Amino acid sequence: MVDIQNVSYGYLKGQNVIKDFSVKFDEGGIYGLLGKNGTGKSTLLYLIMGLLHTRQGQILFNGIETKLRKPETLSDMFIVPEEYDLPSIKLMDYVKVIRPFYPKFSDELLDKCLEMFQMSRDVNLGHLSMGQKKKVYMCVALATNTKLLLMDEPTNGLDIPSKSQFRKVVASGMSDDKIIIISTHQVRDVELLLDKLVIIDNNRTLLEASMSDIERRLSFLTVDRNSLPENRLYEEQGLQGYNVIVPNENEEEGTPVNLELLFNALLTDSQSIQNAIKG
């Protein structure tokens, strides 16, 4: 479990990006971490990794403060940042360097992920395009087999087929004892992959819920102006009519979750959406 307790952090003195913020991430789930620009999503990932130190509060991973950067903690967590450089060496030489830090490193998982991305073991990291680097680095990240994996905008730079492969690769590396947290603005790239959502805004959690609960409690519809439901919780005009969210009062088979619409609704009236999901 990742337990974030009353955390505050700012890059400049007296200016907090995150203030008195709390949330928990449980094992066995792929989380979507969503929020507007500047709400501190990337900062939160770096705080979880212990790369930044909280000004207030604490972050615990399996009961140990991550800012202490203990070997037993570091060896069970990995981050894929939005931007990074890779050395101009062969992939397997790179793996040889990092493997000792991750005792659960899996060659089998590495080969499986590379195959799914149609990449080879003998590639030179310095000769790859941005999208290829993303794919190879995500394969390495999953192969470390850590309990906690953080990804910041992982689909940026990927073409359309690769985004589909990305979802399959991440799902293949998931197990009941792991936590994967994906911070992204590209919600349509990941909405079919996620188990749970954490949506934040201005140091508060707008929503913390499982995708199954959202599907069970809400319906996402597209209707014309004359068919707008009276019990709608949110409406937004689109190209094909009005996109609306209504309570799924009979809890019948739900509609696919429209994350973009849900996010906009929460920014407008988070309480109504939360109440509908809680039932």
Image (cartoon, rainbow, N blue to C red):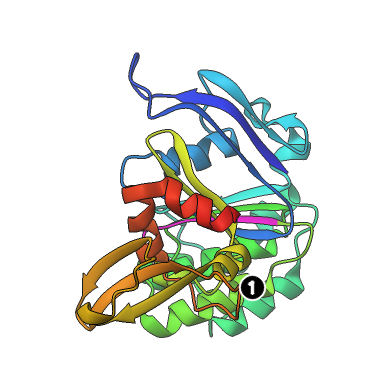
Q: Is residue 180 left or right of residue 73?
A: left
Decide: few, some or many residues near mark 1? Use Cα within 10 Å; few <14, some 14-19, many ≥20. some
Task: Identify whether 269 is placed above or below 8.
Answer: below
Q: Residues in magenta?
A: 179-186
Position in image of residue 227 (x %, y %): 28, 80
Task: Identify whether 223 is placed above or below 205.
Answer: below
Return the residue nearer the eye: 165 or 212: 212
Say which quadrant the N terminus sits in: top right
Is 184 part of what is drawn in magenta? yes
Q: Is residue 198 left or right of residue 189?
A: right
Picture quadrant where residue 194 is located:
bottom right
Q: Is residue 14 left or right of residue 168?
A: left
Is 104 part of what is drawn in magenta? no
Majority secondary structure of magenta residues: strand
Kindly tell me whether residue 199 is visible in this rendering.
yes
Position in image of residue 108 (x %, y %): 75, 75
Report the amino acid beneath label 1: Ala
| Residue at point 78%, 38% (across, down) | 72
Return the residue nearer the eye: 147 or 273: 273
Return the residue nearer the eye: 72 or 247: 247
Picture quadrant where residue 259 is located:
bottom left
Position in image of residue 251 (x %, y %): 61, 73
Say which quadrant the C terminus sits in: bottom right
Return the residue nearer the eye: 219 or 184: 219
Kindly tell me whether residue 127 is visible in this rendering.
no
Position in image of residue 254 (x %, y %): 55, 77
Q: Secondary structure at mark 1?
A: helix
Q: Is residue 252 left or right of residue 189?
A: right
